[in-house]
Image (tube, grey):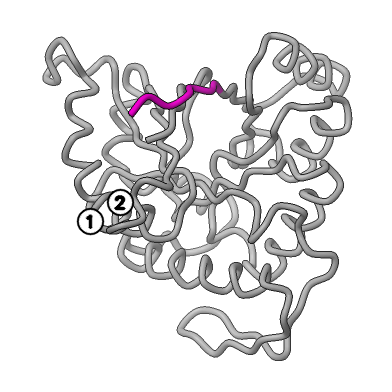
């Protein structure tokens, strides 16, 4: 089944507000579908205000994060911020959410860089909490990592049931989670890895099988995103396995 491609650009930083806003306009004029903002400290913009700024100076360009590190924000507050930016942007926000991968960010913030399994557990619970918040009904939650009492958000996001959720993955557990919970699944490919032969994308077959395993009968609803990585940075990212950030441009397709 043939499905349409769309293309996304990603920004890390800008030297001025005017430069960033001009770049957002240029990305839209060049036909890109989405402008993504990474989530790092010391060398990147903050994805929520940057996404809102980009949305304010464009008309059809979708904006979003690639990816917000779940460990840096309470998901109850993030759910509200996402709902707000979706309303202000006219329903153009896409939330990329990850379990965290770059230890330098954790060190800069002075918070523990837990083992991958714990970070994935926390992300799984965070997604469940956020989806409950977006449902628009007061709820309480008493989990391993998060708690809420009669929590509700207003206004709700324009996109229903919520803005598209992107989760990046390479390893089995994250691929299962992405297939089960995400709307967009980001699969990383290191184009500089010679061991992958002439077709580096062939290595995605196993990851896709794991995504299908998580999605079950709902696999056809997923949008698949390829995240090409280059060089030493790409190899380090692939080994981290928990991340979903990608350099510009990111190629996307459905199905």
What are the residue bounds of the magenta stretch? 1-7
Crowd around label 1: few <14 · some 14–19 · many ≥20 (10 Å): some
Q: Position of residue 98 (x, y in %)?
A: 47, 51
Q: Is residue 127 above or below residue 99?
A: below
| Quarter location, residue 23 | top right
| Of residues 167 and 5, the one drawn nearer to the viewer in this rendering | 5
Q: Nearer the viewer, residue 99 or 163?
A: 163
Residue occupying the point 32% across, 62% down: 115
The picture places residue 31, in percent across and down from the top left corner, at 66, 13
The residue most toward the front is 1
Left or right: 117 as drawn, with respect to 67: left
The tag on residue 196 is none
Q: Are marks 2 and 1 in contact (CB under 8 Å)?
A: yes
Please report the residue visible at 49 percent of the width from the left and 85 percent of the height from the top.
143
Residue 39 picture quarter: top right
Quarter holding the C terminus?
top left
Task: Name the side, left or right, on which 196 lies relative to 36.
Answer: left
Give the residue at x 53% y 51%: 97
Q: Secondary structure at mark 2?
A: helix
Q: Give the Cα distance between marks 2 and 1.
A: 8 Å
- Image quarter hosting the N terminus: top left
* Numbered badge on residue 175: 2
Q: Report which residue position mark 1 lands on.
A: 213
- Which residue does the image show at 82% across and 41% down from the upper left? 89
Residue 4 among magenta residues: yes
Q: How many marks?
A: 2
State the image coordinates of residue 32 (x, y, percent, origin top left): 63, 18
Between label 2 and label 1, give the one nearer the viewer: 1
**Location of residue 242 in the rendering, given as x and y in whole percent from the top left corner:** 36, 49
Q: In the rendered view, tell whether residue 101 sits above or below residue 80.
A: above
For residue 90: magenta? no
First along the sequence among labels 2 and 1: 2
């Amino acid at each position: 089944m043939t499905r349409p491609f769309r293309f996304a650009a990603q920004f890390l930083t800008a030297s001025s507000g005017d430069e960033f806003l001009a770049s957002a306009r240029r990305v839209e004029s060049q036909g890109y579908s989405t402008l993504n903002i990474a989530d790092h400290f010391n060398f990147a913009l903050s994805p929520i205000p940057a996404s809102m700024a980009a949305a304010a100076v464009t008309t059809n360009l979708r904006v979003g994060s690639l990816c917000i590190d779940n460990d840096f924000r309470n998901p109850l507050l993030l759910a509200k911020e996402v709902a707000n930016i979706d309303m202000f942007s006219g329903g153009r926000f896409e939330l990329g959410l990850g379990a965290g991968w770059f230890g330098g960010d954790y060190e800069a913030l002075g918070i523990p860089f837990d083992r991958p399994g714990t970070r994935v557990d926390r992300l799984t619970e965070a997604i469940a909490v956020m989806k409950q918040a977006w449902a628009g009904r007061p709820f309480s939650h008493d989990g391993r990592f998060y708690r809420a009492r009669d929590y509700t958000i207003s206004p709700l996001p324009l996109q229903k049931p919520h803005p598209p959720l992107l989760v990046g993955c390479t390893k089995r557990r994250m691929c299962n989670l992405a297939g089960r919970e995400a709307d967009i699944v980001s699969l990383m490919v290191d184009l500089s890895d010679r061991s992958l032969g002439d077709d580096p994308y062939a290595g995605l077959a196993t990851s896709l099988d794991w995504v299908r395993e998580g999605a079950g009968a709902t696999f056809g609803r997923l949008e698949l995103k390829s995240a090409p990585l280059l060089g030493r940075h790409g190899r380090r990212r692939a080994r981290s396995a928990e991340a979903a950030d990608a350099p510009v441009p990111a190629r996307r397709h459905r199905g």
